[in-house]
Amino acid sequence: MATKKTAAKAAEKEVKETVKKTAEKAAEVKAEPKAEAVEEKKAPAKKAPAKKAAPKKTAPKKPAETKVNFFVEFGGVQVSIDEVVANVKATYGKDAKEISVYLKPEESKAYFVADGEEMEMDVYFC
């Protein structure tokens, strides 16, 4: 009988070890998917941020110049300001950096200052 008891104890011990190993394997199998799931969840969060395209450098748009037609009328006669300015430049005789024109229709005169020089010219309102 002693051998039966010893054999039974050995078999029982072997079964316990097998159950223990199976339980450990089951625990490992359950733990692995959790670890993978955690890694999968973290992976999208760790993605590098998308590179933003550098803003294109464009020159600021200049406003369109407005064409102005300016006339002075006196005594029923019109004189274009463009014509007066052209005559002032011709009277001055050289290019000027700055010109200021003072038009006095009642005297038929244009007084102007070109680069600091004062001059006058006749403007005909006839």
Image: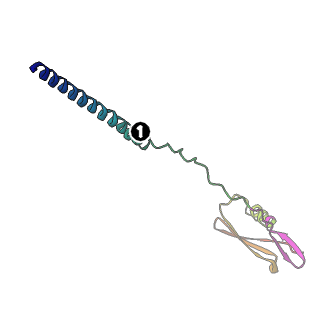
Task: Spot the residue most to the front.
Answer: 1
Is 125 within the magenta?
A: no
Q: Is residue 81 magenta?
A: yes
The quarter of the displayed image where residue 76 is located? bottom right
Identified by mark 1, the residue type is Glu
Please state which of residues 13 and 125 is positioned toward the viewer in this rendering: 13
- Give the residue at x 76% y 64%: 91
The correct choice, above or below, for 40 with respect to 82 in the image is above
The residue to which callout 1 is attached is: 40
Total tally of numbered discs in the picture: 1
Q: Is residue 65 left or right of residue 27?
A: right
Tell me where the magenta segment starts and ends, as one range: 66-82
Numbered disc 1: secondary structure: helix
- Could you say which is closer to the camera, residue 76 or residue 116? 76
Give left or right: position of 52 versus 85: left
Q: Is residue 43 above or below residue 70?
A: above
Decide: few, some or many residues near mark 1? Use Cα within 10 Å; few <14, some 14-19, many ≥20: few
Q: Relative to 105, say whether 37 is above or below.
A: above
The front one of 124 and 80 is: 80
**Residue 37 in picture, x, y percent from top left:** 39, 39
Q: Position of residue 124 (x, y in %)?
A: 85, 72
| Quadrant including the C terminus | bottom right
Q: Quadrant of residue 27?
A: top left
